[in-house]
Image (cartoon, rainbow, N blue to C red):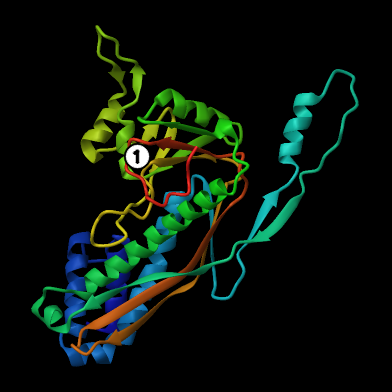
Amino acid sequence: MTLEQFREIALHAAKGTAPANYTTETVNAAFVDGLRELAGTVNKFMKNRYDIYDIIIEAADEVVPKRVISGLSAFAEVKVVGEGQKAMFRRKLGRQRAKKFLTQVGISGVYETFRLDTETFEVGAHAVGGGATLDFQRMLDGAESLADVMEIITEGLTDAVFLEVHKALSAAFSSGNFPAANKATGNAFNATSMVGVMNTVKAYGDNVAIFATPAFIASMGPDAIVAPTAALPGVYAPEDIEAIHNTGLIRIFRGAAVVQIPQSFVDETNKKTWIDDQYAYILPTGREKVVKVVLEGPTQIVDHTNKDNSLEIYAWKKMGAAILTYYNWGIYQNTSLAGHNDTPYGF
């Protein structure tokens, strides 16, 4: 297999598509076979590694932005810019002033004029990445594969963007000036409390999206259309029950999309997660988007050979996130879920 043929196969494998004369199942097998041809021995790998890295970078940069946009587009504006380029976003001014004006006008009163100006601002990016160790002998034995490394890099970079959004929301909340009407807390999930926060946020969008980890979403359970009583069980939406049956999690709550934040552990002890499970974020959709995300430049890959001849492969990408305002999104805390020891929240 030539490098060009391998590049085509790798891009299809990353995107989950198939070229002519292939199926999605045979594409993955062909990708593994191509890697075996190009890196089946230490010498072959050392000869072809930079071409392989270029292909991994091209696949990651093809897939990661699309996954990010697909997962965040309901409430986030995502920009992909070249290396060293500024990610400029436009913020409409005057809209909140206009809302106040419209609520205060009286019959035959004096009308104040306003203009919906725009303000341009920059969202900076910083490098986020990780590494993987590849043992040549285990690779030759088939116990390890560059294909697994490629998949880990792609998924890891996508998850890192979700983490950046979570960190931006955390920083915005911790900075203060967060309205009481935009938050709720309890030692269990309470649908009425969630709806109260949603109604506040809906004033700033056509609808809302709920942004939470799998543990929080699982605590929500099916939505009761008719609440249970002592004598009768509750009535639940069949779609919720089917979604829980198929995935363990609901996808819609009172007409709002439930967006899953990818979750993982900080280290091998599995005691501390990346993202605090106690919190769900309620963000407006359909109008100006609260979250701004930037992906800058191509993915970068370097390697280092250890004394035992194992190879450490490091990949990173520049990314960043920012929150537009504080009063047009909400947060819900379920204290029954395990939280971080160093969580910045509390209300």
The location of residue 265, given as percent across then percent down, is 29, 57
Q: Is residue 78 visible?
A: yes
Residue 243 image offset from top left, x and y in percent: 27, 35
User: Split into 4 quadrants, where in the image is the N terminus?
Assistant: bottom left
Position in image of residue 168 (x %, y %):
52, 54
Q: How far across and down, in percent of the image, does residue 92 sit?
A: 70, 48
- Is residue 4 in sight in this rendering? no
Farthest front residue in view = 341
For the image, the number of numbered tags is 1
Label 1 SS: helix
Q: Left of 225 or right of it: where is 312? A: left
The image quadrant that residue 16 belongs to is bottom left
Q: Say which quarter of the image contains residue 177.
A: top right
Q: Give the residue drawn at x 72%, y 40%.
A: 95
91 up-or-down from 312: above or below: above
User: Label 1: few (<14), some or many (≥20) within 10 Å?
Assistant: many
Residue kind at label 1, given as amino acid type: Phe
Most foreground residue, 203 or 191: 191
- Residue 83 in the figure: left or right of residue 136: right
Going by the image, does 94 lie left or right of 200? right
Q: Which residue corresponds to the image point at 46% horizontal and 74% vertical from the top-left?
A: 298
Q: Residue furthest top?
A: 231
| Residue denoted by label 1 | 216
Q: Is residue 232 left or right of residue 282?
A: left
Residue 217 occupies quadrant: top left
Q: Nearer the viewer, residue 254 or 232?
A: 232
Q: Is residue 94 above or below residue 20?
A: above
Residue at 30% from the left image edge and 30% from the top image edge: 221
Compared with 170, 133 (above or below) is below
Q: Residue furthest left?
A: 141
